[in-house]
Amino acid sequence: MGTGPLRLRLHLDHPGAGVDLPRLCAELQQVIGRGLDLEVVPSERSAFCPADPAARRALAQAIAATKVTHPATDRPSGQGTRRRPFEGEIQFEARRLGGDASAAGILYDGFWLQQVLAAALPSTQMRRDWLHLLLTNRLIGTFDDSDRRWHARMVLCGQPSIVSTTGMVLAPALPRDFYTQRHLHEQSGSGVLGEHLRAQMGEAVVQHDDPRQTQVAVSLTLQALLYWTTLEAFCTTAGCRLVDAHTQAALVALHEDEPALCPRHGHWAGAL
Ligand SMILES: [Zn+2]
């Protein structure tokens, strides 16, 4: 980066029990080394968790407005108008910012949420040598114009970058057998839920609070750093941990044993 180490600031938003934070930090430092100035921002100092009640409420209201409540008809920010959030939704988000509510099951418009969070950052840190990253269990999605549907995402690159532990579970496609089984259960009206079928797949897929989420979070953070420093979104070399995994099988395979970078990205990480 020329002038000094890249400042990576990690903000935590209920990432869940699967992420071992000290291990995540140690791994990042090991891969990148001296080129990285890494700090985990305590929530009382995080711009994404303002202490001032008025600022907290304003952020809560802005976040509540990014919820995708009707995936079939809701469109991304800038494409049509959305309803204003209800008071209860704002209070829920304010409680969550205060640390005592879970956002499980809620889908957020990822790019809009990113804009809301970016607006909360100090302008002095909106620079190329600072990268803020939110590690969260919020489910974030982006709208794909080609199939007119929302898709869950594991990572959104940019300032701030967002890494979603729920996205690790829900974004990559499950093995074909899962969809067959789910279809059969739906047809027979057995009442067996997709969540139950997913849990039954065990270690073949990344589960909620799965300890493998630590290594996946390392890879996705590296992906965010790669994009921030080179505008390259991911790698296409088989086996590189920066490969964009579209299936659970690919994600699990990349992170068993020792996940590694390809020689080109190993060089990139070492030169940061
Ligand atoms: Zn690579």
Image (cartoon, helix red, strand yellow):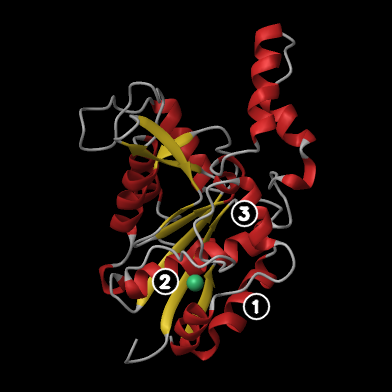
* Residue 251: image tag: 3
Query: Disc 1 marks which residue?
Result: 26
Label 3 Cα neighbours within 10 Å, binned few <14 / some 14-19 / many ≥20: many
Which corner quadrant of the image does residue 141 belong to?
Answer: top left
Amino acid at circle 3: Leu
Mark 3 vs mark 1: in front? 3
Outermost residue to the front: 238
Which quarter of the image is occupied by the N terminus? bottom left
Label 1 Cα neighbours within 10 Å, binned few <14 / some 14-19 / many ≥20: few
In this rendering, the answer to whether 197 lies above or below 270 is above
Which type of secondary structure does the marked residue at label 2 adopt? helix
Mark 1 vs mark 2: in front? 2
Mark positioned earlier in the residue sequence (3 or 1): 1
Towards the viewer: 96 or 147: 147
Q: Is residue 247 left or right of residue 54?
A: right
Residue occupying image coordinates x 21% and y 33%: 79
Towards the viewer: 116 or 29: 29
Towards the viewer: 109 or 42: 109
Amino acid at circle 1: Ala
